[in-house]
Image (cartoon, helix red, strand yellow):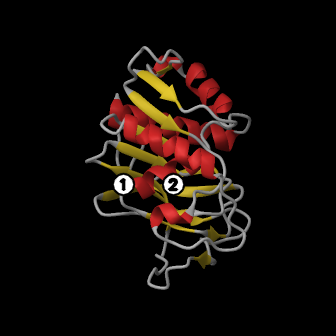
Amino acid sequence: MKIKIIEDGYSTAVARMFNVRKSFGFHPINDDNIKPDLIVFTGGPDISPEIYGQTKLPGVHVNIERDKKELAIYQKYKDLPKVGICRGGQLLNVLCGGNLWQDINKHYNDHEVINLLSTGKYEAGESIFMTSSHHQMMIPGPGAEVIAIAQNASGDKGIATVHKSSDANLKPTPYDPEVIWYEKEKTLCFQGHPEYLNTRTSRDSCDYFFNLMNYFYG
């Protein structure tokens, strides 16, 4: 499968991850003349809250130019399947009709997630360790299927206790969504960092990521 990785300061590690895992059949392409099979959006700064109908709160740091660039790319490839990692997952979640918490806590390091979907290698209810580095969090939209949730971030013994939003109608759930799938849009939103390959936790996360890639796209 030919994958186009949206280029930015965070894409090198993601491209390296796909190159390391070539045995899974997913191959990055750089030639714009080759039509990709799937688009990958990667990590980076916060997404402008205006995109999902909120007012920006203090502590939210956005890159308007990158937002514009990626929105244009999304429209260009709107009919293709997509994958988002960290910021990319949050962006795709919003564009599929979801929302975001502008600021949360307890997701700055390695933590446990619970897989909710039996996919062959992973059974529903199985624990996976994931490397995270995000202070914003996905709120699933209509049609979303939550694939993995955080329940016990290592070191702080609990899910997020801070949920900041300019929308007073939003209420926290008793779990933190970490992986979301949109069937209609063929879009996978993966909030962790599977491309960090230097620890056992991140390798576990990477294996889980590619397991889902094979399940949904393979």
Give the class, few, some or many, for how many residues have Cα within 10 Å of label 2's Cα (few <14, many ≥20): many
- Residue type of the residue flagged with mark 1: Cys
Residue 74 percent across, percent down from the top left = 42, 41
Please tell me whether mark 1 sits on a helix, a strand or a loop: loop
Q: Residue furthest left?
A: 184
The answer to whether 39 is drawn above or below residue 189 in the figure is above
At x 30%, y 37%, the residue is: 79
Pick the front one: 113 or 95 = 95
Residue at the extreme bottom: 168
Residue at point 41%, 15% (across, down) = 34
Residue depicted at 58% across the width and 40% down the height: 42
Residue 171 visible in this rendered orientation of the protein = yes
Quarter of the view holding residue 157: bottom right
Quickly name the residue at label 2: 90
Q: Identity of the amino acid at label 2?
A: Gln
Whole-percent x, y for residue 214 in the image? 39, 31
Query: Is residue 14 placed above or below 50 in the rendered structure?
Result: above
Q: Nearer the viewer, residue 3 or 176?
A: 3
Q: Position of residue 92 (x, y in %)?
A: 44, 50
Q: Is residue 146 left or right of residue 136?
A: left
Q: Visible in this render: residue 85?
A: no
Image quarter in which the N terminus is found: top left
- Mark closer to the chain start, 2 or 1: 2
Would residue 169 be found to the left or right of residue 207 on screen?
left
Q: What's the mark number on residue 96?
A: 1
Q: Secondary structure at mark 2?
A: helix
